Amino acid sequence: MAARKPPESWFWSHDIDPRYIEDVLLAGTHLMRLSVYGTGKMRRFASISYREPGTESNYLLDVPAAELEQKVQEAGIRPVSITADTSTGEVTFSLVLQKGPGLLTTVHQGLDEEGLVALLDEQHCISDFATYVADGQRKYAALVEERTGPSWVFANVTAEELDRAVLSHGAMLTRVRPFLDGGVRKFTAIGERAAPGRWAWYTDIDGDTLARHLHESESYPIDLEAQRDERGVRYTVVMARDRS
């Protein structure tokens, strides 16, 4: 799998007004992940940022589906995170981009489950993805890196089924996206070969619980997905710690 080295430091943010995403692009850090949640005046973003040398971050906000590939190409820098929003009735995407050298990355959208799985082969891995509903059908958008695996897609599974799949493949999760399917909480996730060190994932937790897990396990987040429901903002997170 791709090397996972703990960042020098990190922080996560939530309740980011779309007008002020620029505020999380702090000097000496780079943005790793944006996740959109909520609707209307309550639409917000959650983020992960790492302090590491050698890269700069930028972002694209609310790109219409029909313009996605063109806008990424025009930006001329590598996409590393993608999140989808259907709150207006149309599909738009927001992406994190990183300047500097990196793996060749391509963007794909409008995929069904079979199409998402087909993106993987011996030379390609999914670095990030988003799931959304369009025309009544569950769809996926994904960022694909040109690098060797192995990696796996675990699609449309319950939490228990996902845990069993991870164990049977000797994998660790890198991306997890929850959704409701007929009122049942399901997940689609990406797994890669487990690296040395401990890791864990949690879902449907509030911000205080997320912060407590990160602190008590001395871990850092490698993936974050935020959703708002009648209880407030709930998070799905993958966290890891150094092998020590």
Image: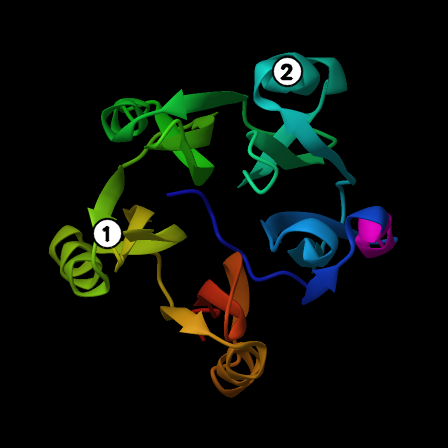
Residue 219 coordinates in the image, percent (x, y): 51, 74
Residue 241 among magenta residues: no
Q: Residue 182, which numbered label?
A: 1
Quarter that holds the C terminus: bottom left
Seen from the viewer's position, the closer of residues 227 and 60 is: 227
Give residue 124's quadrant in the image.
Answer: top left
Above-or-below relation of 10 to 61: below
**In this rendering, which labeled residue sits more in front, label 1 or label 2?**
1
Residue 47 coordinates in the image, percent (x, y): 66, 56
Q: Residue 67, which numbered label?
A: 2
Seen from the viewer's position, the closer of residues 191 and 189 is: 189
Q: Residue 165, which numbered label?
A: none
Predominant SS of the magenta segment: helix
| Residue ID at (69%, 55%) | 44
| Residue ID at (34%, 22%) | 123
Region rendered in magenta: 20-26
Residue 21 among magenta residues: yes
| Mark 1 Cα shell of 10 Å, populated few (<14), some (14-19), many (≥20) | few
| Mark 2 Cα shell of 10 Å, populated few (<14), some (14-19), many (≥20) | few
Real-space Cα distance between discs 1 and 2? 31 Å
Residue 228 coordinates in the image, percent (x, y): 54, 63
The amino acid type, in three-letter code, at marker 1 is Gly
